[in-house]
Image (cartoon, rainbow, N blue to C red):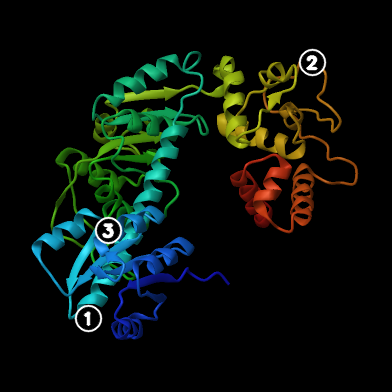
Amino acid sequence: MFEPRKRTLLIIDDEKALCETLKDYLQGGGLSVLSAGTGAEGLAVCSQRRVDVVLLDQKLPDGEGHALAPAILERSDQTKIIFITAYPSFENAVKAVRTGAHDYLSKPLDLEELKLTVDRMLRTQDLEQVEQVHALEQERDRTRAVIVGSGGGLAAVEELIMSAAKTSAPVLITGETGTGKSLVAKSIHYLSPLAKAPFIDINCAALPENLIEAELFGYEKGAFTGAVATKKGLFEMADGGTLLLDEIGDLPVHLQTKLLHALEAGEVRRVGGTTPRKVKVRIIAATNADLANILGKTFRQDLYYRLNVVQIHLPPLRERYQDLPALCEHLLATIVPGRKLRLADGEIGRLQQYSWPGNIRELRNVLERAVLVNPQKEVCPSLLIGRRSDRACAPDKQVPAGPQPTASPPSGGATLADIEERAIRDAMQRHAGNLTHTAQALGISLSTLKRRIKEFRQR
């Protein structure tokens, strides 16, 4: 069973009795306490292992603590340093802070105050790690929010995205499932002045009706059974940033009124609460439904007009075949990072004969499967949508547009999914279950491998 990493606290002080007292008091609860009598010994410990918090004495036998602090932080800039001294002064405190201290305590130490300070340092370290992960995810989202084919079938869409990014007006994105509506929403956000603010999305069709209100607007403790603590809603979490309401056409009618109020008044009220809370959120809505046909029935007209300030319609893939080469190149680069894969000769022509009812999402799925079944430099995805041959790409021929007949399973009754699962199991066995090595051997990304394994387990 996986166990959380033990945190380490290092005491650098030449008073052995003090070190033992502090060690006995602070040790335990997931915290390991070490001690060192000199600066050199303390620096050696920091060089050999990760140290989360250092209690650093200002006066050491081989130097002063403030001179040692930069060397400790060189080895780990995440380490939190608490200076302790028997000679407190304003000048020493300023010097300690300038050299990297996070707190400054004077001897004799109050053990309870010290424990609270150490706990605060550990919580600060946790929050910094969360912020770093969030920043990394934001950067990844930013780099993924690339509109491929903007010079061809999406030229008009790109212009609308650039225009929408310059305003804070609501945006309504329409288009069939799999056309990339959430990608367009992220592009608008990361091209706007709100790029560093939160981007939060919710699929209105994915949650039960009785949970959507609490998810969007939050709730107070005791508002309903199970509400054991107060929780912020997505509107409050997205304050200052962007909130994407995906599949807005599935939002219950009684919540549409509350959403309209939030848009017009710039405030929300939690479930079970009485106090309105001001929020400033840029709303982007997306739908694969034709809202104009359900106005006045299951969708409010006033909300539609409030959302439809800027409308961006994404054409289906069958209407932008000129973008297929660029799309395939981009998707292959994300499926197998670092490898130069290309489509076999004639593949683009064959792919352009297919109607792609699942749009770009289906194209990515087909490319992933093609790479998984035959991880060579040349990829033949058309074999997975028309008549297939396991040996080589079929010669160029006209393939009827529209949905293709299901391929006959290979000899032995195995389906394509069976072949993929067998290939993954064999590779995992060869590499002793190491997912990273298995993905490299199969020529796919680690995320693709994990997704396939999850799919096989759900079969």
Asked if marks 1 and 2 touch (Cβ < 8 Å), the reply is no
Please name the residue shown 57% across and 20% down the image: 326
Of callouts 2 and 3, which one flags the residue occurring earlier in the amino acid sequence? Answer: 3
Can you identify the residue that label 1 sits on?
Answer: 112
Asked if marks 2 and 3 touch (Cβ < 8 Å), the reply is no
Q: Quadrant of residue 251?
A: top left
Please name which of the two marks, 1 or 2, marks the residue nearer to the observer: 1
Q: Quadrant of residue 54?
A: bottom left
Q: Residues within 10 Å of mark 2 (few under 14, many from 20)?
A: few
Judging depth in this view, the residue of 21 and 85 nearest the camera is 85
Q: Residues within 10 Å of mark 1 (few under 14, many from 20)?
A: few
Query: In the picture shown, does residue 236 fall above or below 57?
Result: above
Which residue type does callout 1 highlight?
Answer: Glu
Q: How crowded is mark 3: few (under 14 residues within 10 Å), some or many (20 or more)?
A: some
Q: In which quarter of the image is the C terminus?
A: bottom right
Which residue type does callout 3 highlight?
Answer: Ala
Q: Residue lying farthest left?
A: 90
Give the SS element for disc 2: loop
Using the numbered discs, state the Cα–Cα distance from disc 1 to disc 2 in whole angstroms: 80 Å
Using the numbered discs, state the Cα–Cα distance from disc 3 to disc 1 in whole angstroms: 28 Å
Can you identify the residue that label 3 sits on?
Answer: 67
Q: In the displayed structure, does residue 365 sit left or right of residue 204?
A: right
- Position of residue 112 measured from the top left corner of the image (x, y, whole percent): 22, 81
Residue 397, which numbered label? 2
Please name the residue shown 68% across and 28% down the image: 341
Judging depth in this view, the residue of 89 and 350 nearest the camera is 89
- Position of residue 40 measured from the top left corner of the image (x, y, whole percent): 38, 65
Of callouts 1 and 2, which one flags the residue occurring earlier in the amino acid sequence? Answer: 1
Which residue type does callout 2 highlight?
Answer: Lys
